[in-house]
Image (cartoon, rainbow, N blue to C red):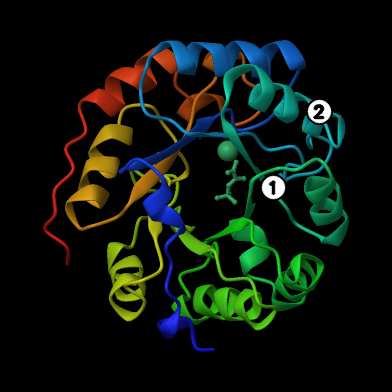
Amino acid sequence: MNLRDLENSWIKDFHQPLIIAGPCSAESEQQMLETAKRIKNTNAQVPIFRAGIWKPRTKPNGFEGVGVIGLNWLKKVKEEYGFKTATEVANAHHVDAALKADVDILWIGARSTVNPFTVQEIAEALKGTEKIVLVKNPVNPDLALWIGALERLLGQDIKNLGAIHRGFSTYQKTKYRNNPNWQIALDFKSQFPNIPILIDPSHICGNRTGLADITQEALNVGYQGAIIESHCNPDEAWSDASQQITPEVLGEMISNLKVRNSGL
Ligand code: PEP
Ligand code: MN
């Protein structure tokens, strides 16, 4: 089957825009449950809670994720607050552990999408899954790599696919942590109109102030939703502190989003 022929109906099961939110990293059970509770209390439509369990950090010797224990906390978030859960997987061990812990949505991170061996390993470990699998764009501005990763998943009979636009790294200093390079994502979108695409304003902006504008811009051109980092105490976050927002700020931001049906 060709990626272009894929009929992606999974997104229709969710309120639109689909918002996935939660901390960059799982840090403790208390941090996870408090963040989930406060997101729930905003009454915003956030059906999916995200948290990184294994963290791909740029440099060694920093916090590299809590590991499998975090999967128990995701399970608690699901049981206590009714969220579906999402985490990043970067190798076959992660996939096995996440499937065993019944994580609902898995995503492939930008540093994994660049590596065909890694993507192939993940795809084979997930073979035939009906879980939703989201693929972030590769860190480098290479549309073919992004598409190739999705093709590898489809090649293993994984059909509930989606894309996440998280921006592209650049050596130039710009106002963005990762340049949005909208044209690449729009080319993706026009080639594969049936594959849902979400914006990740957190990793594009790298700060708290640009999030709403980037998200609105994405919705204006027909993106179906966003994945946004939210933490109960952003200033103290163990990773990506400068871009995370409190659940209350998140709720306010979501309530100001306007869904437009302009398409491309
Ligand atoms: C993340 O979502 O926390 C993350 C590490 O993202 P990316 O792969 O986009 O850098
Ligand atoms: Mn992050």
Q: Is residue 126 left or right of residue 48?
A: right
Q: Residues within 10 Å of mark 2 (few under 14, many from 20)?
A: few
Q: Which residue is mark 2?
A: 72
Q: Nearer the viewer, residue 45 or 228?
A: 45
- Vertical comparison of 248 with 114: above or below: above
Label 2 residue near ligand 1, CB within 8 Å:
no
Q: Quadrant of residue 235?
A: top right
Q: Which residue is mark 1?
A: 58
Q: Is residue 238 visible?
A: no
In the structure shown, which secondary structural element does the residue marked by tag 1 occupy? loop
Kind of residue sitting beneath label 1: Thr
Kind of residue sitting beneath label 2: Asn
Kindly report the distance in space between the C-alpha atoms of the residues bearing marks 1 and 2: 26 Å
In the structure shown, which secondary structural element does the residue marked by tag 2 occupy? helix
Query: What residue sits 57% from the left and 16% below the top?
Result: 35
Q: Quadrant of residue 42?
A: top left
Q: Which quarter shows the C terminus? A: bottom left
